[in-house]
Amino acid sequence: MVRRAELAERLHRVRERIATACAAAGRDPAEITLVAITKTRPAADVRLLYELGQRDFGENRDQEAAPKAAQCADLPVRWHFVGQLQTNKAASVARYADVIHSVDRLRLIRALGNAARRQERTLTCLVQVSLEGPTADASRGGAPPAQVPALADASRGGAPPPQVPALAGAIAGEAGLILGGVMAVAPLGGPAAEAFARLAATAAAVRAVRPAATIISAGMSGDLEEAVAAGATHLRIGTALLGDRRPPVM
């Protein structure tokens, strides 16, 4: 099987990169969870990666993720939803996702909590932090989560760092949800190491109040080394693992 051999080689290379990055940072590779981002890829790739030992998979569009998760319902994998999530999609995503990386507003927290309780599931949620431009450096004591200002790039989502502790508290207080930690995407064109250092500081502020929120989801194919150096626990790897994107699988 050509595709299986290709995926095996790619998985090996990614794991080698992670091991090398961990050695440079003085960390144990066992601390890192590799999330295979399978967007635009068929369920067959999920199955092949599962055979190769991969257990965590991520998607960013419910329209693609829901049927893919259903096709792989017989596999004991963990599904991570990593894309921007509309409130009206919360009920659908709550049916299959185990970890939701992109929680950035109170209304979404309430919708996810309601969906989790209705479906008798428990969802791990991460607060998405905006590291975009001046918004990410908003002055202390910024607007409350219900009044999140416009982001430098709203399509990437995320809450400014001053609002993150309040959102974390809201997740922790919502029945059906577990506060896992934080997530961020490095700004386009900026130094990833600097951005991830800011994320690490925000994560530390959350852990100071809620010690169990240990997840730091950061780093993709092009910047996983910088993420590991900054303390990331979860890496969201797509292209390096599965190759260039294809038209979405529907």
Image (spheres, helix red, strand yellow):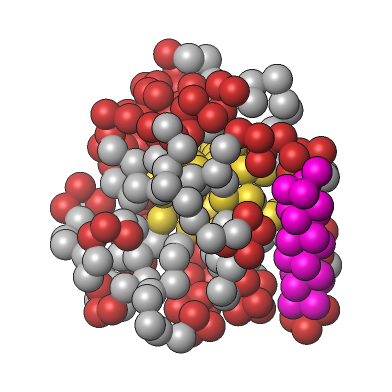
Quarter of the rendering occupied by the N terminus:
top right
- Residue located at (81% from left, 38% from top): 51
| Residue furthest front in the image | 2
Q: Residue at x 31, y 73 (%)?
A: 132
User: In the rendered view, would you say 201 is above or below 115?
Assistant: below
Residue 71 visible at all: yes
**Quarter of the view holding residue 124:** top right
Nearer-the-camera pick, 108 or 40? 40
165 relative to 45 in the view: left or right: left
Residue interval drawn in magenta:
1-21
Give x and y (percent) for residue 107. 26, 37
The image position of residue 183, as x and y in percent, is 48, 58
Q: Quadrant of residue 238?
A: bottom right
Quadrant showing the C terminus = top left
Residue under the image location 74 percent in, 53 percent down? 7
- Residue 77 percent location from the top left of the image: 69, 33
